[in-house]
């Protein structure tokens, strides 16, 4: 039993705890109507076999003051991001998104023009990825100055089999799509009231769900995948733990986002360490056999314009290490984004 | 464009507004992966055709201070109710529930024992109706005294075709399961600090989703169905409007919950009017041809123990009327529960 937030530690622990209370351990779990549960709590999305289809199902809640600040973020950008972060969970399983539900708790000042712009941004993302908004629930916030709450649920579908976090094997390469640290650079600038780097703000406000990339990677035969929502330093341990492997990350290989590079250059910070702790990038982290990974590194940029960069490998020995250019290993620094911590400055 | 809450009026209007922005009007809407949307926003649940199955999908958000008060309601009861109100939406389509996602925004004092009891109550309902909790999202509330927010999404399945709100026809009988006004009697007593009527409190705290009843009614060939969450006076207009009919309710026929009867007797209130405005009963409202309704009125109690009572009929003329024992008609009083209004006393 948990008594306070420091004991609680992380969202991950709480979800696991509810999962253990919820599910007896029969695998797969038989549901009503001949359906069965293939994967429950603990991956990016739940997986259900329903009739002849494999369905993916996820929900993500955004809380004002925890996940966003309305004095920093336009309604339209918030609308986009609310859906995009959920689509990223579907992408992380290699699936297609079918539709979305939107639930809102709205303080009174978030009606009118503000709400119109929020819905516009949400629907812009919905149209861009062909995911209609098909239902939801709207509510008054608890008090006039109550927090705005956004909860989105997305249903998806995946062919043959989803890519789980737990499929990694020792010797697999670790790879990431795109570049890391851009969203964090945007957040750091916002904290200083600096809106000069539009690429940094764009990375923070308008994450791109890697849906097409996830589907191609799944079809290419990768072993494991997840999205990087809390930073590589926080998310890689989850993939490694689920795969019962350790991991080595070669720090010089980490693709650092140009906006993160600029931020770090101005302050003489280490861009690699900055990018390792960069929450909300929503890039994909992959484990794949080297023979699978190599052709995908050419195919993915050619077909989607998105890079795929090897950053290390899985090992048998449990633990997480950073390896420098000379091959020296140090334990991976803890870090990344914890949803039980507030965003700074709130 | 809406500028304030009084213009906004009701949750129903906002959902319809988002629906119009979301969907172009193509019917059915084709989704990814060969799926299609049969029903979007506006019924109790969305309906999707995915492969060889018809899926139902719904979400309901409960906001502290709007939908519940924690000084009135035990964590365990709140856990039960959070799932039960969502299952009621699946029941209202004649479906079976497959699984649930739970998203929480938790103020710090709602961890530990409190959270354990909440999850116990949620899982008690989940086990009772065979609906596993298979995922979700947990978050810190915005501030130490932030409101507790609960958002539940439920996925269901329905055989052949769901029962929609819009299938009613002039001449159909209107019927309700169980009895009305019990939950409101519980709420009224709580507002006075009176916990003497345990049946009233039970009706308010532990609504019973009519899943088995909804499935039997669907199989029996009824025309239209919805659950009564906002009170008959607020919900019947939705069914009548969707069915392009008017409705006549015979006031002497309305089955008044014993707890509502007791409350009204002590105060010389009219129990029929009280029950008409009784939010959160989660009984089913049905429209069916008389020849369909009559055998169901015997079959439903025999198979489920739940009564099915005729309360009126649909008519061609648009409008809503109450008819007294002498056949005199008066316009139906407006009323019921509006989720944009606070619960009294908050």
Image: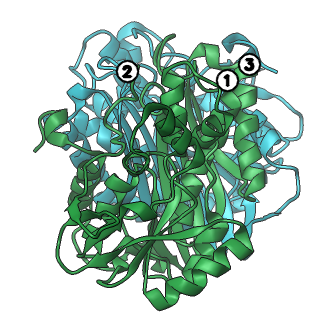
Chain colours: A green, B cyan
Local crowd size for mark 3, using a 10 Å CA cut-off: few (<14), some (14–19), many (≥20)? some
- Which residue has dot 1 on it? B10
Number of the front mark, 3 or 2:
3
Compared to A55, does B249 lie above or below?
above
Both labels 3 and 2 in a single chain: no
**x, y percent for residue A15:** 29, 52
**Residue in front for this viewpoint, A249 or A166:** A249
Identify the chain of the residue marked 2, using the numbered disc in the image. B
Give me the residue at 36% from left, 48% from top. A273
Foreground of the two, A248 or B250: A248
First-in-chain label (2 vs 1): 1
Tag 2, which secondary structure? helix
Compute the Cα span from label 3 to label 2.
32 Å
Q: Is residue B17 above or below residue A337?
A: above
Asked if both marks, 2 and 1, belong to the same chain, the answer given is: yes
Q: What's the distance in space between the residues labelled 1 and 3, CA to CA?
A: 14 Å
Q: Nearer the viewer, mark 2 or mark 1?
A: 1
Residue B176, horizontal then vertical, whole percent:
56, 44
Q: Using residue A228 as the reference point, say whether residue B46 is left or right of it.
A: right
Image quarter where the N terminus of chain A lies is: top left
- Asked whether the beta carbons under mark 2 and mark 1 sit within 8 Å of each other, the answer is no
x%, y% of residue A93? Answer: 50, 70
* Residue A27 vertical placement versus A59 (above, below): below
Q: Which residue is mark 2?
A: B187
Asked whether disc 3 touches disc 2, contact meaning CB atoms under 8 Å apart, the reply is no
Q: Which residue in the protein does label 3 denote? A: A112
Residue B279 at least partly seen: no
Name which quarter of the figure residue B37 lies in: bottom right
């Amino acid at each position: 039993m948990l008594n306070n937030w420091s004991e609680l530690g992380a969202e991950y622990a709480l979800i696991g705890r509810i999962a253990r209370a919820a599910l007896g351990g029969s695998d797969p779990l038989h549901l009503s109507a001949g359906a069965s549960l293939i994967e429950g709590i603990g991956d990016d999305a739940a997986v259900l076999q329903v009739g002849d289809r494999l369905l993916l199902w996820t929900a993500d809640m955004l809380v004002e003051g925890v996940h966003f600040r309305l004095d920093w973020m336009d309604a339209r950008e918030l609308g986009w991001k609310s859906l995009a972060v959920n689509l990223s969970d579907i992408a992380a399983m290699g699936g297609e998104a079918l539709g979305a539900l939107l639930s809102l708790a709205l303080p009174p000042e978030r009606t009118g023009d503000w709400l119109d712009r929020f819905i516009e941004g949400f629907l812009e993302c919905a149209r861009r990825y062909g995911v209609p908004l098909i239902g939801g629930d709207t509510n008054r916030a608890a008090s006039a100055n109550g927090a705005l709450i956004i909860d989105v649920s997305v249903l998806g579908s995946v062919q043959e089999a989803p890519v789980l976090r737990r499929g990694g094997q020792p010797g697999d390469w670790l790879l990431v799509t795109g570049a890391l640290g851009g969203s964090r650079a945007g957040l750091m600038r916002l904290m200083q009231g600096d809106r000069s780097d539009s690429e940094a703000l764009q990375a923070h406000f308008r994450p791109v769900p890697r849906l097409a990339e996830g589907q191609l990677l799944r079809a290419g035969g990768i072993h494991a995948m997840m999205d990087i929502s809390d930073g590589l330093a926080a998310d890689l341990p989850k993939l490694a733990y689920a795969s019962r492997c350790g991991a080595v990350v070669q720090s010089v290989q980490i693709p650092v986002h140009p906006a993160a590079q600029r931020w770090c250059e101005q302050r003489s910070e280490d861009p690699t360490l900055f990018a390792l702790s960069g929450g909300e990038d929503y890039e994909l982290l992959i484990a794949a056999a080297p023979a699978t990974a190599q052709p995908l590194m050419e195919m993915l940029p050619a077909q989607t314009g998105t890079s795929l960069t090897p950053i290390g490998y899985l090992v048998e020995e449990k633990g997480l290490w950073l390896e420098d250019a000379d091959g020296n290993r140090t334990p991976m620094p803890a870090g990344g984004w914890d949803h039980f911590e507030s965003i700074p400055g709130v």
